[in-house]
Amino acid sequence: MSTVTSRRLLNIVSLAGLGISIWFTIYCFHLGVFKNTAALQGLVSHAEFFGPLLFIGLQIVQVVIPIIPGGVSLAAGVLIFGPVEGFVYNYIGIVLGSLVAFALGRRFGTPLIHHLISQKTYDRYIGRITNQNRFTKLFALAIFLPVAPDDVLCLLAGLTKMSFKAFTLIILLGKPASILAYSYVLVYGGTFLAHLI
């Protein structure tokens, strides 16, 4: 499969995921989820064991292949499972997904990365990996702050000489802050807006 075809396919999947996310948000709004999270938690209460596993699996895949917007899945975790368990499941899924992305970048290199990210995105970040020490510092800062495309950076980190141990340590220590920030803004921001409407 050519990179153009794979990119088109991923774009279609991402657009479909975005559409489903918008539908799900509207559906949750009508259920009153943003005013009463117990309504959403009740939807998944019958899947106490498989619900978390399915969600963690979704987060792992989400890091490597953006099926739905990452912010939406983060907020969904907190809304569905509550702030503590939601954070834990988000953290586990995103950490494991990041490790998978790094391993894939390391194992399959640039050809795979071209299938997963656009040429424009690749060109924007590839120049930053030439200086290993500088990239490691920038990578750690980007993972800590909730502003960078972490999935892209994890894939590209696989192309560098960064050790798996160093990568893992950065992900383990840097991810909690960005997950908390995203979750807080998306969930409590959505709740605040729902009370205004």
Image: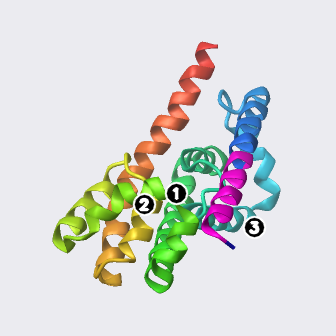
Tell me the residue at 52%/36% (across/down): 186
Residue at mark 3: 50
Q: Visible in this render: residue 59? A: yes
Q: Nearer the viewer, mark 3 or mark 2?
A: 2
**Residue 55 drawn in magenta:** no
State the CA–CA distance, disc 1 to disc 3. Answer: 34 Å
Residue at mark 1: 118
Q: Which secondary structure lies at badge 1?
A: loop
- The answer to whether residue 26 is left or right of residue 105 is right
Tell me the residue at 63%/46% (across/down): 76
- The N terminus, quarter of image: bottom right
Dominant secondary-structure state across the stretch colored magenta: helix
Tell me the kind of residue under disc 1: Ser
Tell me the kind of residue under disc 2: Tyr
User: Mark 1 near mark 2, Cβ–Cβ under 8 Å?
Assistant: yes
Report how many numbered discs are placed on residues in the image. Answer: 3
Q: Is residue 145 or residue 36 the one in the foreground?
A: 145
Mark carried by residue 122: 2
**Residue 8 drawn in magenta:** yes
Q: Which residues are magenta?
A: 2-16
State the CA–CA distance, disc 3 to disc 2. Answer: 36 Å
Q: Find residue 169 and report its horizontal and vertical position in percent.
A: 31, 74
Q: Which secondary structure lies at badge 2?
A: helix
Residue 51, relative to residue 169: is it above or below? above
First in sequence: mark 3 or mark 2?
3
Q: Is residue 64 or residue 185 the one in the foreground?
A: 64
Q: Find residue 100 and report its horizontal and vertical position in percent.
A: 52, 76
Q: Find residue 19 and report its horizontal and vertical position in percent.
A: 74, 40
- The answer to whether residue 50 is left or right of residue 63 is right
Tell me the kind of residue under disc 3: Phe
Q: Residues within 10 Å of mark 3 (few under 14, many from 20)?
A: few
